[in-house]
Every structure is written in structure tokens, then in C-alpha cells.
Amino acid sequence: MSALLKRRFFEQIKIMFGREPSKPKEISPAAQEIHFYKKGNRDLIAEKRHARAHAQPKNTWRNRRWITLICANLLFSLSFGLDIQILEGALTASRFVGFHLIDLNSALQVMLAHKHIINNLLIGTGTVLVLWVLLGGRTFCSWVCPYHFVAEWAEKIHLFLARKKLVTDQTMDRRLRTVFWAIFALLALATGYTVYESISPTGILSRALIYGPGLALLWVLALLVFEVFFSRRAWCRYACPIGLTYGVVGIISPVRIVYKLDGCFHEGDCRKVCLVPHVLDTVIKGRAIETEVPIGPDCTRCGLCVDACPTGSLSFEVKGLSKLA
Amino acid sequence: MSDNDSAPPRKPSPDTKPTVSIAKRQTERRRVLRTILLTGGVLGAAISGFLPLVYAQKKRLRPPGALDEKDLLGSCIKCGQCVQVCPVQAIKLADLIDGVGVGTPYIDPRAQACDFSCDAVQCILACPTGALTYHKPSFLSVRPGAALAAKPILLAKEKDEEPTLNLHERIGIARLTRPEACLAVQGKGFKGQTRGPGFKGRMRYMAVDRWKPINISAHPYDLAECDLCVRECPIKNAISIETVFAPDGSQRKSPVVHEPCVGCGVCEMICPVEPGCITVEAGEVWKI
């Protein structure tokens, strides 16, 4: 890893905690050359128009992801509903054919509130920690979390209404999520009660899917209404402490999206579909510091940008392995 | 807008800030306000999570092995694995209005009590966080009267090598709350399905099948003197019919709860009188 990418690595962690991305101060000579080549290049513009005209909309990764998400949640429901006992429990804690799995944020809340860690809790947390370090931290958000799924549909409604000029996306300060994370951790520690767990839409939805709906779903509904009419994907973007916990886990994860500068037309389609557009700051014209830039840890690896990119400049990568797509 | 096209372009003066900046600052200010709004909203909702602590006096019966209420609320991860392993599905997860913490487990014994059909208190075994536990961690105190004098003997496995349940504390205690309505007190018998034909509650009857609980409605009774609460109590020596003296000196029979009672609630479920004469006081301790 070059010194530039190393600096960017730490910068991306700060961005995950809420800092706004800024223009890079230094760009590698190789990247500078490409940036220079792209300036006012008529061939490139013609190529761009051509690619635009022949662009095939694809949803490959989205479909794979939805299938995974639905299957994971269905497995929970069926394990109890049909008593097949493969994945018992809910997303907060479960057992996969006997192996304990415990959601990292829930585990953290319980550890802080209860101040006593039993072996099962430790084993379950450790297993899940290793799992998500390998799979990419916030991969949990887009590939497993049921709230992410319903929020994606709410987002479609929001974008439809926004096109009709009926609503506008009200953005907020992303540092809020870090503040929430700290508040909920401190509340658990000080009150000895897992406050966050009682409002976590992930937990509420997961339990509703397994044990049947309850009034707690009204809170989830309120969040969705807020997202549709007021602020796009507000919970996932500005509030959810689970996302930050998994983001931190994914810092050193080998599964990630990688951006290749040379083919990119800098049209920003990827940023339009992205849940966390600040991680795609590097695709803005003139911002890439290297010819290949790994996307930061706040990325949920949802693959929407991979699908959206007409030139294949964004792709999944497993560090050290051959490319996936 | 009245843009004057003919006017010469103004030179940007270095002293005044461009108008864009003011607009930008306003947007920025609105953004901050919105952020504060969302913060307030989420924290407001979070405070509702504390309601169960406020309403702590309205107690619900927790599953066997549950820590004391406040510790349970702190340690329960709300996964429902206890719900999943229960063979009679006695455990339910609380909703918003139940006032006992969203997603935490409780038992409504009148509808479905824990009859220890599982023999090993599976819910404790399933709990990943120790909110339900066989061994309370040493730093948590045991309330006086909550500890059981001895491990309770489960009548169903009395003949097994290990007849006891691995329970050290009771989850509540049964109490004859309406003695005047009790059939045993009145010297009456009971014939038919206790709780009626539509009752969904289940229990295991050792005479039927040790490993398969059946509907209580499928097991009618014919008793010359009602002793259902004693007859169906799963714990040895927890309750018996005794001859007691009324204040006027007259003798009568009455169910009497003893120290081994763990508070499982079978007596409450099985009582044929509506509403039930005997109820489990959740979290209550043994008082002499």
C-alpha cells in the first residue's frame, strides 16, 4: 500500500465517523496522468456518449443481495415456524445448527448494561466478529438487515416523490450517528438497561418476522414515513449505531468495492444510488489519488454502484484473491 | 426576479461576502436544526424504552431462572431463543404496551403456564446472555425468600436418577387469592374439561406421553373433591390440600402452598373457576 493510500485509509475511518470528505491534497503521478488525459478529451466524450446510449440497466448484485437477505430472514422465520431448527433465535442472537451467533451491537449493549459476560455470549460474539471481519463489516447492513430491505423500498417511494417535486431530501449531519452510538453506549453503561435494543428497528423487525407482528412495528413505520417524506434513508445514514459498529468491524475487511480510475466517465450514477455517497467521493472528477482506490469501511458492499456503473469501474474485490465480478 | 440585464456586471468587492455564502449558511443552519430534530426524536423514542423500569410494579412472570427484573432488562438480548425451545410455548415476548420491555420474555400462566415438560429447563439452556441462568453470578444478590431451600424435585422424573430441576430461585409464588370461590374450600367436586373445550393451554400428562404435551381440553376430569391445583402441580411438596380452621372455628379443606413452590403457574392455569382462585405472584418470595 502506497503512503497515499495509507493516508486515505485513515481518512476514510474519520469519514465513517462523520467527517465530510475533502479534495485530496496529493495525487499520485499515475493518477495525475489519467486525470490530465481526461481533460477535454473529445474521444473520451464520444466514448461516453456511446456507452450512455448502449447502457444496459442491470440489477445483478441487487438481486443476489435481496435473495440473500430474504433467505437469511426466512431461515429465521422457518426455523421457528416449521420447527426445522436450523437458525434459532432472532437477528440479535441466534444459534446456527447449535453454534452461537450474537449481533455485535446487541452484544455490546448487553455487555455494557449487564457488566457480566458469560461464555456463550463471548463465543457468539467472537464467531460473528470473525464472520463480519471476513465478509466486510457493513455487509451485514445491506445483505442481512431486514430494515435495510424495507428502507430500500421506502427510498424508491421517496425518489419517486422527489422526481414529482413533492418532497426533497433533507440531509443531516453524519456525525450524529457517532453521537448516537456514544449516547446509547453510555446509557447502557449508566442505567444498566439496553435502551437501544428497545428501539432498534433491526431487532423489532426481525422479531416481528419470527414471532409475529406487534405494536413496536409502529416505530419502524414512523421511521419509514420520515424517510419517505423528509429525509432519504435517514435512519441508516444518520442514526443507526449498528451500522457504525459493523463499519468499525469492516475497517480491515478483505471484501470491498474497488474503484478503477481509467475507465470512469465521472458521471456520478454510482453516487446517486449509493446509501453512503461520501464513500464514493473518490469518483468525482479529479479526486482519485491512485489509479485503483479501495472504497472505505462505511461502504455497505451492497453492489448498487457496481450495477449502476456503465464502465465497470467499480467492482467487488477480495483482497488477495482474484476479482469476483 | 428582476434581473437587470443591461447593468454592467458588478465587480466582486473583497470586503463583502458573496450572496451564495449567506444562502449556504442558511441551508447549513437548517441542516443543523434538522439534525437536532432527529436527535430529539430518536432519543424521545429511546426514553420510551425506560417505561418498563417506571412501571416495574406491574410485574409479569418471567421464565424460570430469570435474573431479578432490573438485571433481566439489562442482560436480555431479546432474541426469543427461550420462546423457541419451550415445548408448551409458555414464553411470549413482550410488546410495546406490555410495559415489561419490548422483546423480553414473560409467561402468562393463566393462558399457558410452564409445566417443565422439557425436564431440563430448556429456556435457561437456550439463553445466550445469562439473563436466564442456572447459576446466578456472584456479584448479583439473592433476595431473601427467593432462594429455594433445596433443588425442586420434578414429580415427572421422580423415578429418574436425577429427579431435581436445576433451579436455585423461585420466579414467583402461588397464592390462593379467592378462597371463597375455591371448589376445594367449598367441598365441591369437578367434572369435565377444566377451562372449557376451547382452552388452548397444553400440559404433559405422564400417564399419556412423557414427551408429548397435549391440550388440557383433551384430558377431562371426574373428581369427587376438586384438587386440580395439587394433582397437577409438577413440583414435589409444593402444594397440598390441608384441613384448616376458619375464623369461626369450623373445619374445611383448602389448598396450601409450601416452600418448594417455584411459581411455575400450573395451578393458576388448571384452576377450573373463572376467574382463577389461585394465582402466581410474579417475583414474589417465600415468607413464613
Image: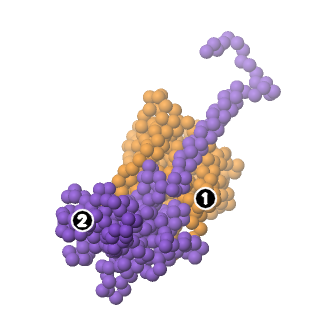
Chain colours: A orange, B purple
Residue at the image point whose x is 63% and y is 55% from the top: A182
Residue at 34% from the left image edge and 88% from the top image edge: B161
Q: Nearer the viewer, residue B261 or A140?
A: B261
CA distance separating discs 1 and 2: 52 Å
**Residue shown at the point (18%, 63%) measured from the top left:** B192
Mark 2, other Cα within 10 Å: few <14 / some 14–19 / many ≥20: few
Q: Residue at x 64, y 38 (%)?
A: B32
Quarter of the view holding residue A203: bottom left
Q: Please, which residue is most extreme toward the top here?
A: B6
Q: Secondary structure at mark 1?
A: helix
The numbered mark at residue B188 is 2
Disc 1 designates what residue? Answer: A191
Most extreme residue toward the bottom, as rendered? B161
Instruction: Say which amino acid is labelled 2.
Output: Lys
Instruction: Inspect the image, locate mark 1, and give the three-letter code of the amino acid beneath it.
Output: Thr
Query: Does A310 sit above or below residue A208?
Result: above
Residue A272 percent across, percent down from the top left: 50, 41
